[in-house]
């Protein structure tokens, strides 16, 4: 969807290098929410579309104001509600009950081992593209589109012409797969764009931007 | 921005909990009380990324590629397989492409849409990598961003910015600095910083005292 998460090329956000910017987590709760997301996933506690889709569905002003792990927390609540694991109001009720007391702890060594194993193993690699439509050095144009659902085709490359750099493999089109819709895996290409094609003239000497784009996003140029 | 090997990342402050922290604690407590998650599983996941999985892994990969041309070749041909040779792999790294810096070519990595990052070799991303300015500017004014990090590249250097828009994860293979010809792999790994493997720094030949 064409939301504020699609940030490539936006102006006005200021400096990248700032005090505290080097940290992975600023607070303990951020680490715990990161881990809670993974453990909830392992336990099958989430419903509805995937984490990225939910995060992108945040109201734009909220998305921009929230910290990174605040968005993870918000997304986890929505996905737990979508499955019926929790119902609206339960978190607030627990906040009131916890006030001034230590939170409960529980041990489940098997779950701990399973959670770590999943991260150490990861999902399978992308499959090999058997008969991709485009070959390296083919010129391609990114389709004009305005999807109201999830996509991994950023606005800043739509309509632009680039050159296929390499064939990355095949994968499920996120625009459908993120909603659990069945699709055939399709080729994913690394496509190289000249900076002038994307941004016009710049104060900086020309550079190249490369993106991994699904076959569906592309047409011959 | 030079202390890249701080794996802890969590700072402890004595102060009242913020509303968002209270909310995060309550969500965890709720799922624990329902018997759906355990606190030791959450601790184990955090520990994995605090102790085992971080930029020290990527540094080993880079150092090996610097000393072993055959390994470098395998790394560039199939990143995930070559990285697995050194015992690293897993979530957010199943398909890895390693992009080599060369004389006149500088690569850097960004995720404009979210925060895609090669966890098995770099651990979890620092705040700046996930920040709005980095996501916005790295594709549209990379030299200006690199200048903030303290690198000024010659005007004729080709800059290649990789925006991680699918499931491929990227690692930059920096150039081996001159003056390190007689260094062993361990000494080399010690100068390979996280930022150099994202492409916002370049390694320098500075020996650290053991």
Image: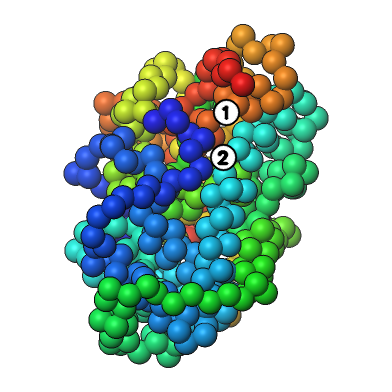
Characterize the local packing of mark 2: few (<14), some (14-19) or many (20 or more) Cα atoms within 10 angstroms.
many
Which residue matches tag 1? B192
Residue B94 figure quarter: bottom right
Residue B195, percent from left and from top: 47, 33
Residue B126, percent from left and from top: 42, 45
In the orientation shown, which residue stands out farthest toward the front?
A: A101
| Residue B180 visible in the shown view | yes
Residue A129, percent from left and from top: 69, 58
Relative to B39, does residue B85 appear above or below in the rendering? above
In the orientation shown, which residue stands out farthest toward the top?
A: B179
CA–CA distance between discs 1 and 2? Answer: 9 Å
Relative to A19, does residue A8 appear above or below in the rendering? below
At a point 28% along the width and 52% down the height, the residue shown is B14
The subunit letter for the residue under badge 2 reads B
Quadrant the N terminus of chain A occupies: bottom left
The subunit letter for the residue under badge 1 reads B
Query: For this view, does B82 lie left or right of residue A25?
Result: right
Query: For this view, does B92 lie left or right of residue A13?
Result: right
Query: For this view, does B154 lie left or right of residue B64?
Result: left
Disc assigned to residue B148: none
At a point 53% along the width and 63% down the height, the residue shown is B43
- Asked whether the residues under the numbered discs 1 and 2 touch, taking CB atoms below 8 Å apart as contact, a structural biologist would say yes
Q: Secondary structure at mark 1?
A: loop
- Front position in the image: A2 or B16: B16
Q: Secondary structure at mark 2?
A: helix
Judge if badges 1 and 2 mark residues of a common chain: yes
Residue A125, percent from left and from top: 68, 59
At a point 75% along the width and 42% down the height, the residue shown is B86
Which residue matches tag 2? B55
């Amino acid at each position: 969807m064409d939301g504020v998460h699609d940030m490539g090329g936006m102006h006005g956000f200021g400096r990248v290098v700032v005090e505290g910017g080097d940290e992975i987590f600023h607070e303990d709760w951020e680490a715990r929410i990161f881990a809670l997301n993974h453990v909830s996933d392992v336990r099958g506690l989430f419903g509805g579309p995937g984490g990225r889709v939910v995060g992108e569905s945040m109201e734009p002003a909220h998305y921009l104001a929230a910290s990174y792990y605040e968005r993870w927390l918000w997304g986890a609540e929505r996905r737990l509600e979508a499955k019926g694991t929790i119902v609206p109001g339960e978190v607030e009720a627990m906040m009131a009950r916890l006030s001034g007391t230590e939170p409960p702890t529980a041990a489940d060594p098997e779950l701990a081992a399973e959670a770590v194993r999943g991260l150490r193993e990861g999902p399978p690699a992308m499959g090999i593209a058997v008969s991709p439509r485009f070959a390296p050095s083919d010129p391609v144009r990114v389709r004009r589109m305005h999807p109201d659902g999830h996509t991994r085709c950023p606005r800043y490359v739509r309509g632009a012409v680039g050159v296929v750099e390499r064939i990355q493999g095949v994968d499920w089109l996120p625009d459908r797969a993120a909603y659990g819709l069945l699709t055939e895996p399709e080729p994913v290409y690394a496509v190289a764009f000249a900076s002038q094609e994307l941004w016009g003239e710049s104060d900086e000497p020309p550079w190249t931007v490369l993106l991994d784009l699904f076959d569906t996003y592309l047409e011959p140029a | 921005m030079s202390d890249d090997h701080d794996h802890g990342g969590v700072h402890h402050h004595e102060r009242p909990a913020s509303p968002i922290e209270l909310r995060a604690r309550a969500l965890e407590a709720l799922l624990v009380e329902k018997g759906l998650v355990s606190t030791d599983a959450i601790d184990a996941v955090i520990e994995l990324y605090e102790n085992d999985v971080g930029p020290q892994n990527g540094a080993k990969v880079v150092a090996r590629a610097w000393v072993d041309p055959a390994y470098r070749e395998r790394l560039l041909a199939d990143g995930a397989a070559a990285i697995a040779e050194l015992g690293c792999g897993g979530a957010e790294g199943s398909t890895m492409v390693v992009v080599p810096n060369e004389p006149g070519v500088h690569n850097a990595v960004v995720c404009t849409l979210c925060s895609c990052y090669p966890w098995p070799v770099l651990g979890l991303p620092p705040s700046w990598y996930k920040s709005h300015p980095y996501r916005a500017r790295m594709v549209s004014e990379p030299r200006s961003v690199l200048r903030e990090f303290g690198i000024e590249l010659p005007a004729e250097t080709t800059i290649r910015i990789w925006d991680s828009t699918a499931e491929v994860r990227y690692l930059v293979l920096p150039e081996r600095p001159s003056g390190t010809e007689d260094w062993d792999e361990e000494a080399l790994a010690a100068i390979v910083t996280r930022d150099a493997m994202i492409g916002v720094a370049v390694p320098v030949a500075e020996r650290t005292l053991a």
